[in-house]
Image (tube, grey):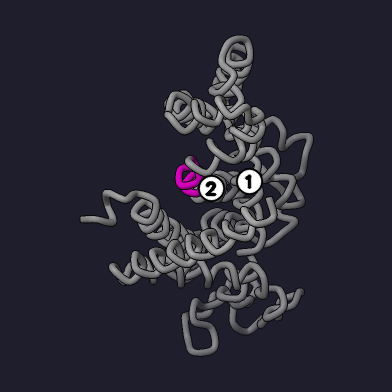
Amino acid sequence: MTAILENTRPVRVSTRRDFWRGVRRVLRRKPSRIAGVVILALFAAMALFGPMIYPSPLPRDDNALYAAPSVAHPFGTDFEGTDVLALVVTGARYVILTGLATAIITVALGTALGLIAGFHRGRWDTALMRLTDLQLTIPGLPLLLVLTTLWKFESPLEMGLVLGLLGWGGVARAVRSQTLSLRERGFIEAARGLGLSTRHIIVRELLPGMAPYIAMNVLIAVTGAIYAQVGLFFLGVLPFDSNNWGVMLNLAVFGGGALTSTAALPYLLAPLLAILLLTLGIVLIVDAMDEIFNPRLREE
């Protein structure tokens, strides 16, 4: 057994090297994909180090209310004389942490339930799919509006938990369909014939084959969570206890009259640009992942 493990280690190392070489090759084929990596890395750095670069409370300049963009203030200032760029950078942490928490919960729940339902079928499949159908019928926005009267969502993890519990149904349905297809393949039949446990077959045989689909769903779930939370803060149904892009949009439109006055326009455009860039970065990475995990596209 020891000899077999020692022989398989070089193969695994070689496979990993080939994989990362393929990733670099795919990224170099289109400069836009490298741009996507740079964009996501930039926003990750903003979420991690933003509050360190701009410690709270942010400085205010009473003599520069709604100041125009300049070298000192690239996106101008808000109604309190606070630098808009600083607000965008520090507000990224709440937005991105919520998106990641939502994606992890959505994909973890959806993948687990979809794999179990598709592999076991029978009563497991029926029960889990009825639960999934029930979840899909829950109106997300009205429920969130009701929850905001009871729950203040002060933490991004709290917001991510609720959004994740409301969004796993579609992933579970899709993973179940993939599992029903894969479970009839020859390698699954061979694993059963060898007497491997159900856990081994699901974790070691089925799950790796769905890795591309799962990874892309993580990124898509992040995008959906960003839109959802920014929309809730923009509508004003959540308390403005933390700085984030949705709060900026609300204050710019309803407090600063950005739609009717050009003075507050940079305060409105800055968070919109941040959302646009983050979404663009995710789309470019998803495009690269599609080619990385799809041999046919790599051959073209």
Residue 250 in percent (x, y) is at 57, 54
In depth, the one of 102 and 57 nearer the eye is 102
The residue drawn where x is 61% and y is 58% is 96
User: Which secondary structure type mostly characterizes the magenta part of the structure?
Assistant: helix
Q: Residues within 10 Å of mark 1 (few under 14, many from 20)?
A: many
Q: Is residue 129 visible?
A: yes
Amino acid type, residue under disc 1 in the picture: Ile
Residue 67 in percent (x, y) is at 52, 80
Name the residue that disc number 1 marks.
104
Question: Vertically, is 203 above or below 71?
Answer: above
Q: CA distance from mark 2 to mark 1?
A: 7 Å
- Residue 161 located within the stretch drawn in magenta: no
Name the residue that disc number 2 marks.
218
Provide the residue span drawn in magenta: 210-217
Apparent side of residue 148 relative to residue 96 in the rendered image (left or right): right
Amino acid type, residue under disc 2 in the picture: Val
